[in-house]
Amino acid sequence: MNKQQKQDPKFTKFHGIDRDKIDWRPVIDESKCIGCGMCATTCGRGVYKFDYENRKSKVANPTNCMVACQTCANLCPMKAITFAENDSTREKAQKIIKEYNILSKIKVELESKKDELNFNSNE
Ligand code: SF4
Ligand code: SF4
């Protein structure tokens, strides 16, 4: 992490895994970026900052990025944002799930959140 980076404490874990260990972050192709600001103003996790002098978005806090979210990439009008070099983004997300055995962690988590998530509760 460089000096500018600031990991929000809310986002330090992904289903119990240290977020720093998981390779999921947006990469901007600056030659395609037109500096529209869509990504910087839309991401709800503070991943981007905007370079107002050079009119380019910058990835400032990559580990705040929600694993497998691709909202900014889908909204970018120039297809300038990518997440996976060789795999498709879906393949990459599924590899992360397998590598960290996340489905078994979710099984436990789901039960622990029953009060919060129960669709059939009366409240
Ligand atoms: S949405 Fe795309 S074109 Fe717009 S600032 Fe972000 S990377 Fe650049
Ligand atoms: S993928 Fe989602 S969380 Fe990550 S930078 Fe883009 S909008 Fe933000």
Image: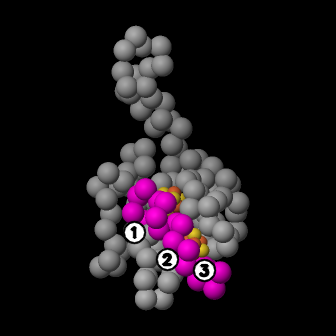
Residue at 32% from the left image edge and 51% from the top image edge: 10
Quadrant location of the N terminus in the rendered image? bottom left
In this view, the residue in front, 24 or 34, is: 34
Q: Is residue 45 magenta?
A: yes
> From this viewpoint, is residue 23 visible?
no
Q: Is mark 3 within 8 Å of ligand 1?
A: yes
Q: Which residues are magenta?
A: 20-47
Disc nearer the start of the sequence (2/3): 3
Seen as rendered, the residue at the extreme bottom is 53
Q: SS class of the residue under badge 1? A: loop
Q: SS class of the residue under badge 3? A: loop
| Front label number (1 vs 3) | 3
| Front label number (2 vs 3) | 3
The residue that disc 3 covers is: 34
Tag on residue 61? 1
Q: Is mark 2 within 8 Å of ligand 1?
A: yes
| Amino acid type, residue under disc 3 in the picture | Ile
Residue at 49% from the left image edge and 60% from the top image edge: 42
In this view, the residue in front, 55 or 91, is: 55
Where residue 25 appears, x then y in whole percent? Answer: 51, 65
Asked if the residue at tag 3 contacts the one at tag 1, i.e. Cβ–Cβ closer than 8 Å, the answer is: no
| Amino acid type, residue under disc 1 in the picture | Asn
The residue that disc 2 covers is: 57
Mark 1, Cα crowd under 10 Å, few <14 / some 14-19 / many 20+, is many
Q: Is residue 5 magenta?
A: no
Residue at 41% from the left image edge and 58% from the top image edge: 45
Where residue 108 appears, x then y in whole percent? Answer: 43, 30
Where residue 80 appears, x then y in whole percent? Answer: 63, 74
Determine whether, in the image, residue 12 is placed left or right of residue 33: left
| Front label number (1 vs 2) | 2
| Amino acid type, residue under disc 2 in the picture | Ser
